[in-house]
Image: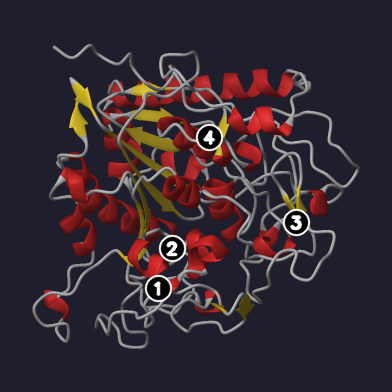
Protein backbone atom coordinates (compact mmCIF):
# COMPACT_ATOMS: atom_id res chain seq x y z
CA UNK A 1 0.00 0.00 0.00
CA UNK A 2 1.37 3.43 -0.92
CA UNK A 3 1.68 6.29 1.54
CA UNK A 4 -0.93 8.21 -0.43
CA UNK A 5 -3.48 5.37 -0.32
CA UNK A 6 -2.80 4.82 3.38
CA UNK A 7 -3.48 8.50 4.07
CA UNK A 8 -6.64 8.36 1.96
CA UNK A 9 -7.89 5.35 3.94
CA UNK A 10 -6.98 7.03 7.21
CA UNK A 11 -8.90 10.18 6.28
CA UNK A 12 -11.84 8.14 5.04
CA UNK A 13 -12.23 6.27 8.30
CA UNK A 14 -11.72 9.40 10.37
CA UNK A 15 -14.68 10.83 8.49
CA UNK A 16 -16.68 7.68 9.23
CA UNK A 17 -15.88 7.89 12.93
CA UNK A 18 -16.77 11.58 13.07
CA UNK A 19 -20.07 11.04 11.26
CA UNK A 20 -20.92 8.14 13.57
CA UNK A 21 -20.22 10.24 16.66
CA UNK A 22 -22.41 13.06 15.38
CA UNK A 23 -25.23 10.64 14.59
CA UNK A 24 -25.07 9.04 18.03
CA UNK A 25 -25.21 12.45 19.68
CA UNK A 26 -28.19 13.71 17.65
CA UNK A 27 -31.76 13.13 18.80
CA UNK A 28 -34.12 12.04 16.04
CA UNK A 29 -37.83 12.90 16.30
CA UNK A 30 -40.84 11.90 14.26
CA UNK A 31 -41.64 13.86 11.13
CA UNK A 32 -45.11 15.33 10.50
CA UNK A 33 -47.96 12.90 10.18
CA UNK A 34 -49.04 11.68 6.77
CA UNK A 35 -51.86 9.48 5.57
CA UNK A 36 -50.98 6.04 4.18
CA UNK A 37 -52.33 7.04 0.76
CA UNK A 38 -50.20 10.17 0.61
CA UNK A 39 -47.23 8.22 1.90
CA UNK A 40 -47.51 5.55 -0.81
CA UNK A 41 -47.84 8.15 -3.55
CA UNK A 42 -44.81 10.20 -2.52
CA UNK A 43 -41.93 9.63 -4.96
CA UNK A 44 -39.10 11.64 -6.44
CA UNK A 45 -41.18 13.19 -9.21
CA UNK A 46 -38.27 15.36 -10.27
CA UNK A 47 -34.87 13.59 -10.42
CA UNK A 48 -33.18 16.95 -9.85
CA UNK A 49 -34.94 17.46 -6.51
CA UNK A 50 -32.88 17.41 -3.33
CA UNK A 51 -31.91 13.93 -2.13
CA UNK A 52 -33.23 12.23 -5.27
CA UNK A 53 -31.16 9.89 -7.44
CA UNK A 54 -31.11 10.44 -11.19
CA UNK A 55 -33.50 8.49 -13.39
CA UNK A 56 -31.47 5.66 -14.90
CA UNK A 57 -32.61 2.88 -17.18
CA UNK A 58 -30.69 -0.07 -15.67
CA UNK A 59 -29.63 -1.16 -12.17
CA UNK A 60 -27.58 -4.21 -11.16
CA UNK A 61 -27.44 -5.24 -7.49
CA UNK A 62 -24.81 -7.68 -6.20
CA UNK A 63 -25.21 -8.89 -2.61
CA UNK A 64 -22.28 -10.50 -0.78
CA UNK A 65 -22.36 -12.22 2.59
CA UNK A 66 -21.59 -11.73 6.25
CA UNK A 67 -18.79 -9.17 6.45
CA UNK A 68 -18.59 -6.06 8.58
CA UNK A 69 -17.24 -2.79 7.24
CA UNK A 70 -13.85 -2.95 8.93
CA UNK A 71 -13.21 -6.54 7.83
CA UNK A 72 -13.98 -5.80 4.21
CA UNK A 73 -12.80 -2.21 3.75
CA UNK A 74 -10.49 -1.78 6.74
CA UNK A 75 -6.95 -0.48 6.72
CA UNK A 76 -4.44 -3.16 5.76
CA UNK A 77 -7.05 -5.42 4.18
CA UNK A 78 -5.34 -7.06 1.21
CA UNK A 79 -7.45 -10.14 0.48
CA UNK A 80 -10.01 -8.38 -1.72
CA UNK A 81 -8.23 -5.34 -3.18
CA UNK A 82 -10.62 -5.10 -6.13
CA UNK A 83 -13.63 -4.65 -3.83
CA UNK A 84 -11.89 -2.69 -1.10
CA UNK A 85 -9.69 -0.35 -3.17
CA UNK A 86 -10.25 -0.51 -6.94
CA UNK A 87 -14.04 -0.26 -7.10
CA UNK A 88 -14.40 2.57 -4.54
CA UNK A 89 -11.87 4.49 -6.61
CA UNK A 90 -14.05 4.00 -9.69
CA UNK A 91 -17.33 4.98 -8.03
CA UNK A 92 -18.74 5.91 -4.63
CA UNK A 93 -17.97 4.40 -1.25
CA UNK A 94 -20.71 4.46 1.40
CA UNK A 95 -19.04 3.47 4.67
CA UNK A 96 -22.10 4.22 6.80
CA UNK A 97 -24.39 1.71 5.12
CA UNK A 98 -26.13 -0.75 7.49
CA UNK A 99 -27.85 -4.10 7.35
CA UNK A 100 -31.32 -4.57 8.84
CA UNK A 101 -31.06 -7.74 10.92
CA UNK A 102 -29.70 -11.28 11.23
CA UNK A 103 -29.46 -13.79 9.65
CA UNK A 104 -29.63 -13.62 5.85
CA UNK A 105 -33.21 -13.79 4.62
CA UNK A 106 -34.60 -10.87 6.61
CA UNK A 107 -32.08 -8.56 4.94
CA UNK A 108 -32.94 -9.75 1.43
CA UNK A 109 -36.65 -9.33 2.19
CA UNK A 110 -36.04 -5.81 3.53
CA UNK A 111 -34.08 -4.88 0.39
CA UNK A 112 -36.84 -6.00 -1.96
CA UNK A 113 -40.10 -5.30 -0.11
CA UNK A 114 -39.42 -3.09 2.92
CA UNK A 115 -40.81 -5.75 5.26
CA UNK A 116 -39.10 -5.77 8.66
CA UNK A 117 -37.43 -8.88 10.12
CA UNK A 118 -39.54 -11.31 12.09
CA UNK A 119 -38.69 -14.48 14.00
CA UNK A 120 -39.15 -16.67 10.90
CA UNK A 121 -37.16 -14.61 8.40
CA UNK A 122 -34.41 -14.21 11.01
CA UNK A 123 -34.00 -18.00 11.08
CA UNK A 124 -33.83 -18.14 7.24
CA UNK A 125 -37.21 -19.82 6.83
CA UNK A 126 -36.08 -23.35 7.62
CA UNK A 127 -39.73 -24.36 8.10
CA UNK A 128 -41.66 -22.38 5.47
CA UNK A 129 -44.94 -20.86 6.60
CA UNK A 130 -47.02 -18.10 5.06
CA UNK A 131 -47.31 -14.90 7.07
CA UNK A 132 -50.94 -14.42 8.14
CA UNK A 133 -52.14 -17.77 6.78
CA UNK A 134 -55.53 -18.55 8.31
CA UNK A 135 -55.35 -15.49 10.56
CA UNK A 136 -58.56 -13.38 10.41
CA UNK A 137 -56.66 -10.38 11.81
CA UNK A 138 -54.13 -10.36 8.95
CA UNK A 139 -53.72 -6.95 7.30
CA UNK A 140 -51.22 -4.51 5.84
CA UNK A 141 -50.77 -1.75 8.37
CA UNK A 142 -50.31 1.98 7.81
CA UNK A 143 -46.53 1.61 7.54
CA UNK A 144 -46.86 -1.07 4.88
CA UNK A 145 -46.03 -3.99 7.17
CA UNK A 146 -47.78 -7.35 6.82
CA UNK A 147 -49.35 -8.05 10.24
CA UNK A 148 -50.63 -11.43 11.37
CA UNK A 149 -49.53 -14.95 12.24
CA UNK A 150 -45.77 -14.91 11.73
CA UNK A 151 -44.34 -16.55 8.62
CA UNK A 152 -41.58 -16.18 6.05
CA UNK A 153 -43.47 -16.34 2.76
CA UNK A 154 -45.67 -13.41 1.80
CA UNK A 155 -49.22 -13.24 0.45
CA UNK A 156 -50.12 -11.75 -2.92
CA UNK A 157 -51.05 -8.38 -1.46
CA UNK A 158 -47.49 -7.74 -0.17
CA UNK A 159 -45.77 -5.63 -2.85
CA UNK A 160 -42.08 -5.95 -3.69
CA UNK A 161 -39.74 -4.30 -6.16
CA UNK A 162 -40.37 -7.04 -8.74
CA UNK A 163 -44.17 -6.79 -8.53
CA UNK A 164 -43.84 -3.00 -8.76
CA UNK A 165 -41.70 -3.27 -11.88
CA UNK A 166 -44.15 -5.76 -13.38
CA UNK A 167 -47.04 -3.37 -12.82
CA UNK A 168 -45.02 -0.54 -14.39
CA UNK A 169 -44.21 -2.77 -17.41
CA UNK A 170 -40.48 -2.66 -16.65
CA UNK A 171 -38.27 -5.73 -17.06
CA UNK A 172 -36.42 -7.48 -14.23
CA UNK A 173 -34.46 -10.64 -13.54
CA UNK A 174 -32.95 -12.32 -10.50
CA UNK A 175 -29.73 -14.14 -11.50
CA UNK A 176 -28.65 -16.91 -9.10
CA UNK A 177 -25.25 -18.54 -9.44
CA UNK A 178 -25.19 -22.36 -9.78
CA UNK A 179 -28.91 -22.64 -9.10
CA UNK A 180 -28.92 -25.04 -12.05
CA UNK A 181 -25.91 -27.06 -10.89
CA UNK A 182 -26.14 -30.70 -9.88
CA UNK A 183 -25.86 -31.17 -6.11
CA UNK A 184 -23.46 -33.76 -4.83
CA UNK A 185 -21.06 -33.77 -7.78
CA UNK A 186 -18.22 -31.31 -7.34
CA UNK A 187 -17.72 -29.03 -10.32
CA UNK A 188 -20.14 -30.84 -12.59
CA UNK A 189 -23.25 -29.05 -13.80
CA UNK A 190 -26.39 -31.08 -13.88
CA UNK A 191 -29.73 -30.45 -15.54
CA UNK A 192 -31.51 -27.12 -15.83
CA UNK A 193 -34.09 -26.60 -13.14
CA UNK A 194 -37.66 -27.13 -14.28
CA UNK A 195 -39.49 -25.07 -11.68
CA UNK A 196 -39.23 -21.96 -9.55
CA UNK A 197 -36.92 -23.05 -6.74
CA UNK A 198 -38.20 -21.51 -3.56
CA UNK A 199 -38.34 -22.71 0.03
CA UNK A 200 -41.55 -24.58 -0.74
CA UNK A 201 -44.15 -25.07 -3.45
CA UNK A 202 -47.19 -22.93 -4.21
CA UNK A 203 -50.08 -24.88 -5.76
CA UNK A 204 -53.81 -24.41 -5.88
CA UNK A 205 -53.80 -21.21 -3.84
CA UNK A 206 -51.74 -22.57 -0.94
CA UNK A 207 -48.12 -23.06 0.09
CA UNK A 208 -46.84 -26.59 0.71
CA UNK A 209 -43.68 -27.13 2.71
CA UNK A 210 -41.59 -29.28 0.38
CA UNK A 211 -38.01 -27.99 0.72
CA UNK A 212 -36.05 -28.47 -2.47
CA UNK A 213 -32.60 -30.09 -1.94
CA UNK A 214 -31.12 -27.46 -4.22
CA UNK A 215 -32.48 -24.70 -2.02
CA UNK A 216 -32.33 -26.16 1.49
CA UNK A 217 -30.67 -23.49 3.68
CA UNK A 218 -29.59 -26.16 6.16
CA UNK A 219 -26.98 -27.62 3.79
CA UNK A 220 -24.44 -24.82 4.21
CA UNK A 221 -20.68 -25.44 4.33
CA UNK A 222 -20.82 -28.50 2.09
CA UNK A 223 -18.52 -27.77 -0.88
CA UNK A 224 -19.73 -30.87 -2.73
CA UNK A 225 -23.16 -29.29 -3.19
CA UNK A 226 -24.16 -26.60 -5.65
CA UNK A 227 -23.86 -23.79 -3.05
CA UNK A 228 -27.08 -22.09 -4.20
CA UNK A 229 -29.37 -21.08 -1.32
CA UNK A 230 -32.96 -19.94 -1.53
CA UNK A 231 -32.44 -17.74 1.54
CA UNK A 232 -30.33 -15.44 -0.68
CA UNK A 233 -32.98 -15.37 -3.43
CA UNK A 234 -35.76 -13.19 -1.97
CA UNK A 235 -38.15 -13.27 -4.92
CA UNK A 236 -39.18 -16.89 -4.37
CA UNK A 237 -40.67 -15.90 -0.99
CA UNK A 238 -43.36 -13.72 -2.56
CA UNK A 239 -46.59 -15.38 -3.64
CA UNK A 240 -47.15 -12.80 -6.37
CA UNK A 241 -43.98 -14.18 -8.04
CA UNK A 242 -43.60 -17.80 -6.90
CA UNK A 243 -47.34 -18.36 -7.22
CA UNK A 244 -46.99 -18.00 -11.01
CA UNK A 245 -44.42 -20.65 -11.89
CA UNK A 246 -44.13 -19.80 -15.58
CA UNK A 247 -43.57 -16.14 -14.73
CA UNK A 248 -41.11 -17.01 -11.97
CA UNK A 249 -39.15 -19.36 -14.22
CA UNK A 250 -38.80 -16.60 -16.80
CA UNK A 251 -37.54 -14.01 -14.32
CA UNK A 252 -35.84 -15.88 -11.47
CA UNK A 253 -33.10 -17.63 -13.39
CA UNK A 254 -29.70 -19.31 -13.03
CA UNK A 255 -26.79 -16.92 -13.49
CA UNK A 256 -24.93 -19.44 -15.62
CA UNK A 257 -25.71 -21.16 -18.87
CA UNK A 258 -24.65 -24.49 -20.36
CA UNK A 259 -22.03 -24.71 -23.05
CA UNK A 260 -21.94 -27.23 -25.88
CA UNK A 261 -21.74 -30.23 -23.58
CA UNK A 262 -23.21 -29.89 -20.07
CA UNK A 263 -21.45 -33.07 -18.91
CA UNK A 264 -18.08 -31.32 -19.10
CA UNK A 265 -17.41 -28.55 -16.59
CA UNK A 266 -15.03 -26.73 -18.95
CA UNK A 267 -17.97 -25.90 -21.23
CA UNK A 268 -20.09 -24.48 -18.42
CA UNK A 269 -20.11 -20.68 -18.19
CA UNK A 270 -20.99 -19.75 -14.59
CA UNK A 271 -22.18 -16.29 -15.67
CA UNK A 272 -23.36 -17.22 -19.16
CA UNK A 273 -27.01 -16.12 -18.85
CA UNK A 274 -25.99 -12.68 -17.65
CA UNK A 275 -23.34 -12.43 -20.36
CA UNK A 276 -25.92 -13.18 -23.04
CA UNK A 277 -28.42 -10.63 -21.72
CA UNK A 278 -25.77 -7.90 -21.56
CA UNK A 279 -24.90 -8.14 -25.25
CA UNK A 280 -27.68 -5.73 -26.19
CA UNK A 281 -29.41 -3.01 -24.23
CA UNK A 282 -32.84 -4.25 -25.27
CA UNK A 283 -32.12 -7.69 -23.74
CA UNK A 284 -30.75 -6.20 -20.52
CA UNK A 285 -33.40 -6.01 -17.75
CA UNK A 286 -34.15 -2.66 -16.19
CA UNK A 287 -33.51 -4.23 -12.77
CA UNK A 288 -31.08 -7.11 -12.20
CA UNK A 289 -30.52 -8.75 -8.80
CA UNK A 290 -27.34 -10.88 -8.89
CA UNK A 291 -26.85 -13.49 -6.18
CA UNK A 292 -23.46 -15.25 -6.12
CA UNK A 293 -23.39 -18.74 -4.65
CA UNK A 294 -22.04 -19.34 -1.14
CA UNK A 295 -18.48 -19.63 -2.43
CA UNK A 296 -18.51 -16.47 -4.55
CA UNK A 297 -20.38 -14.34 -2.00
CA UNK A 298 -17.89 -15.08 0.80
CA UNK A 299 -20.31 -17.08 2.94
CA UNK A 300 -18.19 -20.24 2.82
CA UNK A 301 -14.51 -20.94 2.38
CA UNK A 302 -14.55 -23.20 -0.66
CA UNK A 303 -10.80 -23.37 -1.21
CA UNK A 304 -9.51 -25.24 1.82
CA UNK A 305 -11.55 -28.41 1.28
CA UNK A 306 -12.61 -28.25 4.93
CA UNK A 307 -16.39 -27.83 5.34
CA UNK A 308 -17.14 -25.06 7.82
CA UNK A 309 -13.74 -23.38 7.44
CA UNK A 310 -13.83 -19.74 8.54
CA UNK A 311 -10.71 -18.57 6.70
CA UNK A 312 -11.69 -14.92 6.23
CA UNK A 313 -8.89 -14.18 3.76
CA UNK A 314 -10.05 -17.04 1.54
CA UNK A 315 -13.64 -15.81 1.66
CA UNK A 316 -12.66 -12.27 0.70
CA UNK A 317 -10.52 -13.55 -2.16
CA UNK A 318 -13.51 -15.52 -3.49
CA UNK A 319 -15.64 -12.36 -3.49
CA UNK A 320 -12.94 -10.50 -5.36
CA UNK A 321 -12.67 -13.20 -8.01
CA UNK A 322 -16.42 -13.09 -8.65
CA UNK A 323 -16.53 -9.30 -8.86
CA UNK A 324 -13.52 -9.16 -11.20
CA UNK A 325 -15.45 -11.42 -13.57
CA UNK A 326 -18.89 -9.77 -13.39
CA UNK A 327 -18.37 -6.02 -12.84
CA UNK A 328 -16.26 -5.32 -15.98
CA UNK A 329 -18.79 -7.30 -18.00
CA UNK A 330 -21.53 -4.92 -16.84
CA UNK A 331 -19.56 -1.69 -17.19
CA UNK A 332 -18.59 -2.65 -20.77
CA UNK A 333 -22.20 -3.34 -21.76
CA UNK A 334 -24.26 -0.91 -23.87
CA UNK A 335 -26.82 -0.65 -21.05
CA UNK A 336 -24.28 0.93 -18.67
CA UNK A 337 -23.69 4.11 -20.67
CA UNK A 338 -20.99 6.74 -20.25
CA UNK A 339 -20.60 10.07 -18.39
CA UNK A 340 -22.23 11.99 -21.23
CA UNK A 341 -25.14 9.56 -21.38
CA UNK A 342 -25.38 7.74 -18.02
CA UNK A 343 -27.74 4.77 -18.10
CA UNK A 344 -26.71 2.31 -15.42
CA UNK A 345 -25.98 1.86 -11.72
CA UNK A 346 -24.26 -1.04 -9.95
CA UNK A 347 -24.84 -1.48 -6.21
CA UNK A 348 -22.51 -3.82 -4.33
CA UNK A 349 -23.19 -4.47 -0.67
CA UNK A 350 -23.60 -7.21 1.96
CA UNK A 351 -26.62 -8.73 3.62
CA UNK A 352 -25.42 -8.31 7.22
CA UNK A 353 -22.38 -7.45 9.29
CA UNK A 354 -20.83 -8.94 12.39
CA UNK A 355 -22.50 -6.54 14.84
CA UNK A 356 -26.12 -5.55 15.42
CA UNK A 357 -26.01 -1.77 15.24
CA UNK A 358 -28.58 0.16 13.21
CA UNK A 359 -29.08 3.55 11.64
CA UNK A 360 -31.68 5.77 10.08
CA UNK A 361 -34.36 5.32 12.76
CA UNK A 362 -34.79 1.67 11.79
CA UNK A 363 -38.01 0.30 13.25
CA UNK A 364 -38.73 -3.32 14.18
CA UNK A 365 -41.77 -5.25 13.07
CA UNK A 366 -44.67 -5.20 15.56
CA UNK A 367 -43.82 -8.81 16.44
CA UNK A 368 -40.36 -7.75 17.60
CA UNK A 369 -41.32 -4.35 18.97
CA UNK A 370 -40.27 -5.33 22.50
CA UNK A 371 -37.51 -7.72 21.48
CA UNK A 372 -35.51 -6.08 18.71
CA UNK A 373 -33.04 -8.11 16.69
CA UNK A 374 -32.57 -11.53 18.19
CA UNK A 375 -28.83 -11.72 17.56
CA UNK A 376 -29.06 -14.82 15.38
CA UNK A 377 -26.09 -17.09 14.56
CA UNK A 378 -23.88 -15.71 17.30
CA UNK A 379 -24.45 -12.06 16.37
CA UNK A 380 -24.89 -9.78 19.39
CA UNK A 381 -28.37 -8.65 20.38
CA UNK A 382 -29.30 -5.27 18.94
CA UNK A 383 -31.68 -3.30 16.76
CA UNK A 384 -30.11 -3.87 13.32
CA UNK A 385 -27.82 -5.86 11.05
CA UNK A 386 -24.60 -3.97 11.63
CA UNK A 387 -22.42 -1.63 9.60
CA UNK A 388 -21.44 -3.21 6.26
CA UNK A 389 -20.67 -0.48 3.72
CA UNK A 390 -21.58 -0.32 0.06
CA UNK A 391 -19.92 0.55 -3.25
CA UNK A 392 -21.85 2.19 -6.10
CA UNK A 393 -20.65 2.43 -9.70
CA UNK A 394 -22.27 4.53 -12.39
CA UNK A 395 -21.36 6.96 -15.18
CA UNK A 396 -23.45 9.38 -13.06
CA UNK A 397 -21.00 9.09 -10.13
CA UNK A 398 -17.69 10.90 -9.88
CA UNK A 399 -14.88 8.35 -9.39
CA UNK A 400 -13.46 8.39 -5.86
CA UNK A 401 -16.62 9.76 -4.20
CA UNK A 402 -17.03 9.01 -0.48
CA UNK A 403 -20.28 9.84 1.32
CA UNK A 404 -20.48 9.61 5.09
CA UNK A 405 -24.28 9.90 5.03
CA UNK A 406 -26.13 7.09 6.79
CA UNK A 407 -28.06 4.52 4.74
CA UNK A 408 -29.52 1.04 5.15
CA UNK A 409 -31.35 -1.58 3.09
CA UNK A 410 -34.57 0.45 3.20
CA UNK A 411 -32.63 3.36 1.70
CA UNK A 412 -31.54 1.02 -1.09
CA UNK A 413 -35.15 0.03 -1.85
CA UNK A 414 -36.29 3.64 -1.79
CA UNK A 415 -33.50 4.50 -4.25
CA UNK A 416 -34.56 1.73 -6.62
CA UNK A 417 -38.14 3.00 -6.52
CA UNK A 418 -37.05 6.58 -7.17
CA UNK A 419 -34.75 5.58 -10.04
CA UNK A 420 -37.69 3.90 -11.79
CA UNK A 421 -40.41 6.32 -10.64
CA UNK A 422 -42.25 3.79 -8.47
CA UNK A 423 -44.25 4.33 -5.24
CA UNK A 424 -42.51 3.66 -1.94
CA UNK A 425 -43.47 0.50 -0.09
CA UNK A 426 -42.96 -0.92 3.42
CA UNK A 427 -40.29 0.78 5.47
CA UNK A 428 -38.90 2.41 2.33
CA UNK A 429 -41.87 4.77 2.49
CA UNK A 430 -41.67 8.29 3.86
CA UNK A 431 -41.08 8.78 7.54
CA UNK A 432 -43.13 7.85 10.53
CA UNK A 433 -46.59 8.96 11.52
CA UNK A 434 -48.75 7.95 14.52
CA UNK A 435 -49.75 4.29 14.09
CA UNK A 436 -53.50 3.71 13.94
CA UNK A 437 -53.39 1.04 16.66
CA UNK A 438 -50.94 -0.30 19.26
CA UNK A 439 -50.33 -3.39 17.09
CA UNK A 440 -49.28 -1.34 14.06
CA UNK A 441 -45.76 -0.19 13.32
CA UNK A 442 -44.56 3.44 13.27
CA UNK A 443 -42.21 3.20 10.30
CA UNK A 444 -38.72 4.62 9.86
CA UNK A 445 -37.00 7.50 8.13
CA UNK A 446 -35.01 6.17 5.16
CA UNK A 447 -33.71 8.42 2.43
CA UNK A 448 -32.49 7.53 -1.06
CA UNK A 449 -28.95 7.94 -2.29
CA UNK A 450 -28.79 11.57 -3.33
CA UNK A 451 -26.42 14.34 -4.45
CA UNK A 452 -23.82 13.17 -1.92
CA UNK A 453 -23.43 10.13 -4.21
CA UNK A 454 -24.41 11.24 -7.71
CA UNK A 455 -22.80 13.96 -9.78
CA UNK A 456 -25.07 16.46 -11.56
CA UNK A 457 -26.47 14.88 -14.73
CA UNK A 458 -24.67 16.45 -17.71
CA UNK A 459 -26.60 18.14 -20.46
CA UNK A 460 -26.45 16.03 -23.58
CA UNK A 461 -24.70 17.80 -26.44
Residue appearing at x 61%, y 66% in the figure = 124
Mark 2 or mark 3, which is nearer to you? 3
Of helix, strand and loop, which one carries label 3?
Answer: loop
Q: Earlier in the sequence, mark 1 or mark 3?
A: 1
Of helix, strand and loop, which one carries label 4?
Answer: helix
- Identify which residue, 92 or 312, lies in the foreground: 92
Q: Earlier in the sequence, mark 2 or mark 1?
A: 1
- Is residue 384 placed above or below 424 in the rendered structure? below
Of helix, strand and loop, which one carries label 2?
Answer: loop
Q: Earlier in the sequence, mark 2 or mark 3?
A: 2
Mark 2 or mark 4, which is nearer to you? 4
In the rendered image, the quadrant that contains the N terminus is top left
As drawn, the label of residue 374 is 3
Mark 2, residues whose alpha carbon is within 10 Å: few (<14), some, or many (≥20)?
some
Q: CA separation, marks 2 and 4? A: 35 Å
Q: Residue 63 placed where, x, y %?
A: 43, 51
Q: Residue 210 placed where, x, y %?
A: 57, 84
As drawn, the label of residue 311 is 2
Residue appearing at x 33%, y 43% in the figure = 83
Mark 1, residues whose alpha carbon is within 10 Å: few (<14), some, or many (≥20)?
many
Residue appearing at x 19%, y 63% in the figure = 272
Location of mark 1 (residue): 227
Asked whether the residues under the numbered discs 2 and 3 touch, taking CB atoms below 8 Å apart as contact, a structural biologist would say no
As drawn, the label of residue 414 is 4
- Identify which residue, 270 or 308, lies in the foreground: 270
Amino acid sequence: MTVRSARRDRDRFRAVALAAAVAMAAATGLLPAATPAAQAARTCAEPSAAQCPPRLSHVWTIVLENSGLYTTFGLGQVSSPYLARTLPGQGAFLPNYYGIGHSSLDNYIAMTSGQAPNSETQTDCTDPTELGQGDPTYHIDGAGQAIGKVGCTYQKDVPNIASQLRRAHLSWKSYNETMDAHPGVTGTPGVQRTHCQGPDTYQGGAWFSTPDPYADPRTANQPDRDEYRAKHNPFVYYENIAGDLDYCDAHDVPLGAFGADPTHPDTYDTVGALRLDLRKEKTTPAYSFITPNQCSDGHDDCTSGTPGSEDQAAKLAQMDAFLRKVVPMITASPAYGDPAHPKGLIVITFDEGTDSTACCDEQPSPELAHEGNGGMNGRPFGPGGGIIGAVLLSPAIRPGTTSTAFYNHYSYLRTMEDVFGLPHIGYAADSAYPPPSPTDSPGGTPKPFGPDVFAPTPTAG
